[in-house]
């Protein structure tokens, strides 16, 4: 029975990442060269995935084309690398009857200048010819960001072969391709071009991949496929890591199946353990035959339409201080953001803080929105600045502009690597670290340029620094915190914390410091939101108790909101007892949740003040 025949009645499990395992072995050169130099390593990885339950494996040929091999000086080795790859895969699969796909990777990233279509088709034709000669069960086109490249490739391959073609796009945003096309439209267009299986791979973790398929209608002739990453990537000690547990990945596979996906594998960060979990969870589950899609409304594009504050850290040294984060829009409609900022400020926020393209995804400049809030609405902005997007020239220019606008509250952070975000091909600058950036900002406060030239005026920045307490050994994190204090940090803002015990641990580890710490509290909005944060977002971990409580809310949004607020209030009870600073992070523009928590903090402080006064009066 062929691959397409099996997919008529079964949900099949594909393999996971090849490069992730090779990377973990310390191999840092062309992976495809191993097909010749060390074929036993590739054979062993194929066998591991088959042992884990994979019904399908793919050849180690993702970059085995002349264009990509040129960077290694191997552009004349296309034939031997592809021929050996398919021989290795078929040898391993022959024992258990697994299907073998010949893999061809996309070439273009964000820039079309990476290669012309003529060059791409010429390269594709050469590689596909050698793969087809090995008689694979299908061809897998994966990690295509450029839809023009993918459609041209499918057309070309459909003209030269009748075997199954799997065509997979990669997205920067859930449900939207790089060119702005909806995933639903793109997959159906690929189906019309002759692709037998259409889907997505790479870039997004399970949470966003599932979200992307929610608006995808079942194809009439083709089948759907999904190879998500294990999670969003993180970088530890210069190495790329993914923080997804295998069981979570397996449970996510069931949700993908519920969206009509019939071929499920893994991309970056996935291992045989992930595939074993997928196989176990999908066992005996039949494919979805019918699906009702509720399409989201099309967003209408509209036409464009010196105060002196007490420094936040000084207030936080003597009394309660609350700052609230509200993300600037990822589109050009700003009314709701301004409305939310007004509501938060009127409710008592000391400042509205705005991230600097968090998770490396572009939003309206926080400098622009901060100036609108300050100059037009008398709202105090706190702007984050990353080291990722600007070189030293840009950083100084940006800071000088903030000073000119009267925006003096700053959070200096390293910034998520660009590979995390919408444009993984974009350059992460990192001329300086966050500690060095703090030092440079303090230099501006002395009236001195980064280069040492006099600025004719002193800046007046109050500088916050980031503190991530969600680590195994808090004392080590405190060591970095102390280095930031030496660099000039005035106060700290933490990542969201989801454990009362962790808040107490932070207090005990930092009580020797005089520098204020604002404890991050972000209310959860749903079970999926909590699992995404726990499994996929670097620097955030939820306690087992919190996960269980959110799990108990099921799919009830009202119950999830109520439980999320209840959990946040319990954390605030502990944080407010030990710290003056509270940092509320507003989820998904739901500023009503932040306002409810602010009111709770004020009531809590009032009750404690009343109790204190009563005790004093009693004595």
Image: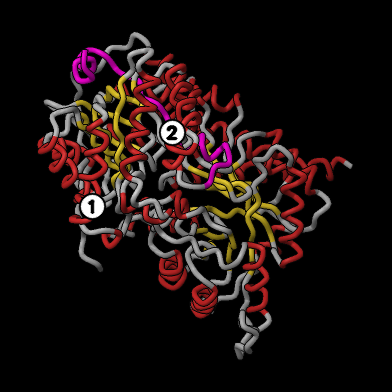
User: Which residue is depicted at the point 58% across and 32% down?
Assistant: 542
User: Which residue is depicted at the point 51% across and 53% down?
Assistant: 416
Residue 522 versus residue 90 in the image, above or below:
below
Q: Secondary structure at mark 1?
A: helix
Front: mark 1 or 2 = 1
Q: Which residue is mark 1?
A: 120
User: Which residue is depicted at the point 12% across and 37% down?
Assistant: 160
User: Which residue is depicted at the point 49% across and 68% down?
Assistant: 390
CA gap between label 1 and label 2 equals 24 Å
Q: Nearer the viewer, residue 477 or 328?
A: 477
The label on residue 174 is: none
Q: Nearer the viewer, residue 489 or 19?
A: 19
Q: Secondary structure at mark 2?
A: loop
One can see residue 484 in this view: yes
Residue 98 in magenta stretch: no
Q: Position of residue 255 (x, y in %)?
A: 35, 23
Q: Left or right: where does residue 562 sit relative to residue 63?
A: right
User: How many numbered markers are drawn?
Assistant: 2
Q: Quadrant of the C terminus?
A: top right
One can see residue 248 in this view: no
> Range of the magenta residues?
1-28
Of label 1 and label 2, which has the lower sequence position? Answer: 2
Q: Position of residue 588 (x, y in %)?
A: 41, 45
Residue 6 in magenta stretch: yes
Q: Which residue is mark 2?
A: 17
């Amino acid at each position: 029975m062929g691959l397409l025949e099996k997919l008529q009645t079964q949900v099949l499990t594909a393999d996971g990442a090849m490069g992730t395992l090779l990377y973990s072995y310390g191999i840092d050169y062309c992976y495809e060269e191993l097909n010749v130099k060390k074929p036993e390593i590739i054979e062993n990885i194929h066998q591991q995935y088959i042992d884990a339950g994979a019904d399908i494996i793919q050849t180690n040929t993702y970059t085995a084309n002349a264009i990509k091999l040129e960077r290694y000086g191997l552009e004349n080795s296309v034939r031997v690398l592809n021929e050996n790859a398919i021989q290795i895969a078929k040898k391993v699969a022959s024992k258990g009857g697994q299907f073998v796909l010949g893999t061809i990777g996309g070439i273009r990233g964000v820039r079309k200048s990476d290669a012309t279509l003529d060059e791409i088709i010429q390269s594709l034709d050469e590689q596909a010819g050698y793969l087809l000669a090995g008689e694979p069960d299908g061809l897998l086109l994966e990690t295509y960001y450029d839809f023009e490249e993918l459609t041209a490739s499918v057309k070309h391959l459909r003209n030269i072969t009748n075997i199954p073609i799997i065509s997979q796009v990669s997205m920067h945003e859930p449900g939207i391709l790089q060119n702005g096309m909806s995933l639903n439209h793109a997959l159906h267009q690929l189906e019309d071009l002759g692709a037998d299986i259409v889907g997505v791979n790479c870039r997004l973790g399970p949470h966003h991949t599932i979200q992307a398929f929610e608006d995808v209608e079942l194809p009439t002739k083709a089948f759907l496929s999904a190879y998500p990453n294990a999670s969003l990537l993180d970088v530890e000690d210069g190495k790329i890591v993914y923080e997804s547990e295998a069981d979570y990945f397996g449970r996510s596979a069931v949700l993908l199946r519920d969206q009509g996906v019939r071929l499920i594998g893994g991309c970056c960060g996935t291992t045989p353990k992930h595939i074993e979990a997928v196989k176990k969870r999908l066992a005996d589950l039949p494919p979805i035959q019918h699906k009702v899609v509720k399409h989201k409304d099309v967003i209408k594009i509209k036409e464009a339409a010196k105060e002196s504050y007490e420094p936040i850290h000084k207030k936080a040294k003597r009394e309660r201080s609350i700052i609230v984060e509200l993300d600037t829009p990822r589109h050009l409609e700003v009314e709701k953001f301004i409305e939310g900022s007004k509501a938060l400020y009127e409710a008592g926020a000391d400042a509205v803080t705005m991230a600097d393209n968090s998770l490396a995804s572009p939003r309206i400049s926080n400098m622009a929105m901060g100036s609108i809030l300050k100059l037009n609405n008398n709202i105090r902005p706190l702007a984050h600045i990353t080291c990722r997007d600007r070189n030293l020239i840009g950083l100084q220019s940006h800071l000088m502009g903030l000073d000119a606008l009267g925006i003096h509250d700053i959070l200096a952070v390293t910034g998520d690597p660009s590979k995390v975000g919408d444009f993984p091909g974009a350059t992460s600058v990192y001329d300086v670290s966050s500690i060095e950036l703090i030092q440079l900002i303090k230099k501006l406060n002395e009236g001195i340029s980064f280069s040492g030239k006099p600025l004719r005026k002193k800046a007046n920045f109050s500088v916050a620094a980031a503190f991530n307490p969600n680590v195994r050994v808090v004392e080590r994190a405190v060591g970095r915190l102390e280095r930031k204090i030496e660099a000039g940090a005035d106060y700290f803002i933490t990542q969201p914390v989801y454990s009362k015990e962790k808040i107490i641990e932070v207090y005990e580890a930092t009580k020797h410091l005089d520098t204020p710490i604002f404890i991050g509290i972000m209310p959860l909005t749903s079970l999926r939101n909590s699992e995404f944060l726990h499994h996929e977002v670097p620097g955030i971990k939820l306690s087992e108790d919190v996960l269980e409580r959110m799990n108990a809310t099921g799919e009830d949004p009202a119950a999830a909101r109520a439980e999320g607020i209840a959990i946040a209030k319990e954390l605030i009870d502990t944080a407010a007892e030990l710290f003056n600073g509270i940092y509320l992070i507003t989820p998904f523009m739901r500023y009503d949740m932040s306002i409810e928590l602010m009111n709770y903090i004020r009531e809590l402080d009032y009750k404690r003040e009343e109790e204190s006064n009563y005790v004093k009066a009693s004595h």
